[in-house]
Image (cartoon, helix red, strand yellow):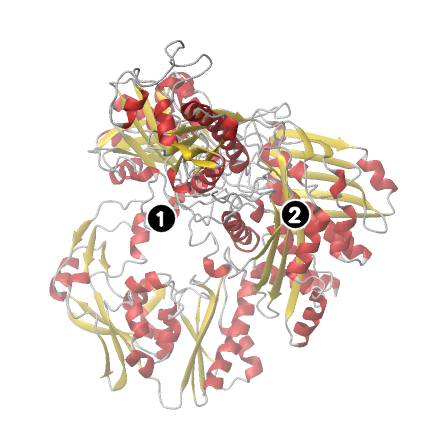
Amino acid sequence: MKPAPFDYRRPGTLAEAVASLAGEPNAKVLAGGQSLVPLLSMRLAAPSLLVDINGISGLDRIEVCEQQGVDGVRVGALARHAAVLASPDVRRVQPLVPMALAHVAHATIRNRGTTVGSLVHADAAAEMPVVLTLLGGHLEVEGPAGRRTIHADDLYIGPLESALSHDEIAVAAFFPALAPGAGVGFEEIARRHGDYALVGAAALVDGDSVKVGYLSVSDVPTVVDLSGVADADLGEAALEKLEPMSDIHATAAYRSQLVRVLTERVVRSVRKAA
Amino acid sequence: MTSKLMGQGVQRVEDQRFLRGQGRYVDDVAVEQDVLHAAVLRSPHAHARVLDIDVSDVLDVEGVHLVYTYEDLTGPMAEPLPLLIPHPALTEGRTQYALAKDEVNYVGEAIAFVVAEDRYIAEDAVSKIRVQYEFLPAVVGVDAARAATDLVHADVPGNIAAKLEQNVGDAVAAIAAAPHKLELELTIERSACTPMEGRGTVARWDRDLNRLQLWTSTQSSTGVRAAVAVKMGLDLGQVDVITPDVGGGFGVKINHPWPEELLVPLAARVLGRTVKFTEDRREHFISSAHERGQVQHIEVGFDDDGRLLGLNVEFWHDHGAYIPYGLIVPIITSTQLLGPYKPQNYRVYFESLYTNTVMVTPYRGAGRPQGCYAMERTMDAIAKYLGKDRAEVRAVNFIQPDEFPFDQGLIFQDGRELEYDSGDYPASLEKIKALVGWDEFPAFKAEMAAEGRRVGIGLACYVEGTGVGPYEGAHVHIETTGKVKVATGLTTQGQGHATVFAQLVADELGVKFEDVEVVTGDTRRMPYAVGTFASRAAVMSGSAIHLAAKRAKEKALKIAGEALEADPADLEIVDGVVSVKGSPGSSIDLGTVSVLSNPLRYAFDEASKAATQFSVGDPGKPPVPEDEEPGLEGRDFYSPERATFASGMHAVIVETDPDTAEITILKYAVVHDCGNLINPMIVEGQIHGGVAQGIGGALYERMAYDESGQLLNASFMDFLMPYVTEVPDGIDIDHLETPSPLNPLGIKGAGEAGVIPSAAVFAAAIEDAEAPYVPGLVITAMPISPSELYALRHSQGLENS
């Protein structure tokens, strides 16, 4: 359980970090390391270079702001899950973020792991990619050509695969604010406390619009529009758009049942809170 | 008079170190030194012929000191690893080689061994070894092994290592004649010990002393010592094995020698350097040992009261690719299955089968959880069939308190008769019913049902043979400072031996608890020992220590009697001071007695002057009397005729979610009888740990092998060992103390009990919770996950609706 050899750089500025990545197609960015380091240790990943961004100041900022005409909260690339979870601003502006973060692994992992890192790791079993997708947020990305924005809908391409190119660094994530009168909810079922969910569901209800995002159901975070569906039919309607998978922890049939239960449960929780 | 410590919940002396991170484990040994590190190339295939191993690329890697394959092994090292426990029925015993010879039989089998400057380089080197394989079909699981379409070992027909049958009376005839009969088909899957600390070995060859020092994370220092000496062609006296703190064993570390326990010292001797191997987690999953996998077929005949008339059990035991630990696990299943019951007529037959998976050696409970599962599921089935209370059906089958000693008529795992020494099962049943609220449960269940909640209760009983032989020994040395040094040879992996053994010594010698220091598992201090397994440490070493302390005390009183001019019978020892009973002025402390016990020519301090030749002794007699030895020491051994039998009963109340099939534990109750308690806090800690492990085995853990023999969940991410969050906040415990007549302390073992009834008790409770809603739902396979319970609701529910 020792990584294969790799080079390591710890630049002090974003520009240097981007420059470090240039010409290194097998380089990886190290932020919290909670997914990357185990992958290295198990030799499931063997990057040529690790670019550690922990020395870059200012990337840990969490701020309420407006982007592209939308109010929301911007979470910097070095903001730890724990800091985001504890932020009163985040809780006030977009309560779905802390609701979901409470389910992200365990306290020790949240103390080190970063929310943006989780977003770019692009694990369909993780909570935060679904949250960003459901809310229609985006990622700010810095590369050789400067900064660009990747909308959540364009971010997730396949299992553990995002739209970032190898020479880009995710700088921040933007979660749009909860609209007045809208409500959010998050439910998941995991085998053990802190495990990846067997199925998780995040809901955004705004007037007649009902959207539910699912984790651990498909290869990528998947949002289903359930607007106009009768409450009793929510689960079945969601399943028409989903194809739950089997693995060693749950059959597809059981995941389907959890989709039914959690869809109904999460929408009810939003309505109840409203 | 100091109050007796036996029976007191004395705080563990170990915890100060453990909780402050000051434990010293094998990986902490020799960290300051220039140590070389080992890594192992392990087979990625479950079954293959090894055609060629090319290590040429490794030799160029900077920092690599040594690469071994089978070709490099000679003499005894090139022979298969020992078959530790031979048995007449084990006709086809096969063990692996330290490094694979020609063939690999499970994913994880050691093929090559690299020693390098550090573990990083060693792993880099391992990845550069190229092996050519010819693939062979993998045999995975009991069904495939029984079908024997493919063979694990070409020369073992039917994949059968052993068949063993035992009979008491004529079970087949008794069942045929019985008024009622039932048949059950049960399976139970694999799990594993998964201690926090994996395996690890450090070796140093001392050229000046011409001897080997070996630190290893084992449950048997003396076993490793003997095996290493034989394999390396050394005399026992040239090999020291030291077991430092061990971060859990739970059985897996009783198997020995592991390939690395031989290859590390071999490399250390060849290189003249200290060499260390520290296993990583994935290695532990795929190259140590698992347990539990069995398929069972049960036929039972009984009367209208549910009284057993005949029991016929056949089971198939998956022991993996090799069988170094012999038939211990299936023999325990086949004998301990009977629990507290009288079967009248009993036949048991098992086959121990090879599969292309990690080998099976004892894991806490060691075959008993499977036996308990078979018996207790049978009791539940009888009760259901007769429409009787499950506790009542058990009660009519109990061995009664006046029937001890009770001979079950079978041969146990130690080759001796299965004769229960003591117990009181009706009393245990009353206690567990009261503790869990058995009689009040139907009302609670109805109340919950009214709220749409499903709850169920389960009960399971067991008897556990503990403290098996052959023996343990102890050495008690009272130093001239008055401090007492105790050594026993078996090892410690967190049980609290240093505490309970010190309690026994403090009581027997009359010294302060704080003045007693216990050393375990160091062959330099006690070279005669067996090991820590089968819930035997307290019974075996506890008794030996008690006896050794008694000898030291006798000697102390004799010497003190001479010094005080008193009859030893009139002396007592309190807090380390010997005095004449009733005349406290006439006294001598034990340190001074120790000084006097060793006649000196040379004084080395003020106190020792008292033992020099012009100060002490009768000039007409030899300074050391005949039949005596210098020094204030006692040494003794304890070797009982047979095991002592602890027992207990568990009950659990669970809730199953009607929608998600999630299983929640509402209450877990344990009644436990391990004879006289030395330290109730430690016994309860053992029960808590056992129950937690049992919950893992019943509801979370399994070894997910695919049909090609790949273990799909070889990490703590996918092997679902329960966290503290999955274990109930409180476990209700009540003790019963029926002393064992077999040892001087009246004690029985307590280490494994907590885990034994888990599969049985959870299957029963979940079935009970579901019964009103899914009539006919029967749980015949454990462990069970929510996904599986959901599937059962649909398959069996539809079938039975």
Seen at 32% across and 83% down, the residue is A92
Q: Nearer the viewer, residue A199 or B545?
A: B545
Seen at 38% across and 48% down, the residue is B15
Where is residue B463? Give x, y as percent. Answer: 65, 42
Q: What amino acid type is highlighted by mark number 1? A: Gln
The residue labelled by disc 1 is B16
On the picture, is B759 further left or further right than B225?
right
Q: Residue furthest top?
A: B620
Q: Nearer the viewer, residue A142 or B678?
A: B678
Q: In which quarter of the view is residue B516 placed?
A: top left
Callout 1 environment at 10 Å: few (<14), some (14 to 19), or many (20+)? few
Q: Which of the chains bears the disc numbered 1?
A: B
Q: What amino acid type is highlighted by mark number 2? A: Tyr
Q: Label 1's element?
A: helix
Give the alpha-carbon distance from disc 2 to disc 1, as whole Å: 39 Å
Q: In which quarter of the view is residue B260 placed?
A: top left
On the picture, is B344 further left or further right than A262?
right
Q: Is residue B289 above or below residue A159?
A: above
Seen at 24% across and 33% down, the residue is B35
Where is residue A116? Give x, y as percent. Answer: 28, 68
Q: Which of the chains bears the disc numbered 2?
A: B
The residue labelled by disc 2 is B373
Where is residue B300? Give x, y as percent. Answer: 78, 44
Callout 2 environment at 10 Å: few (<14), some (14 to 19), or many (20+)? many
The answer to whether any part of residue B100 appears in the image is no
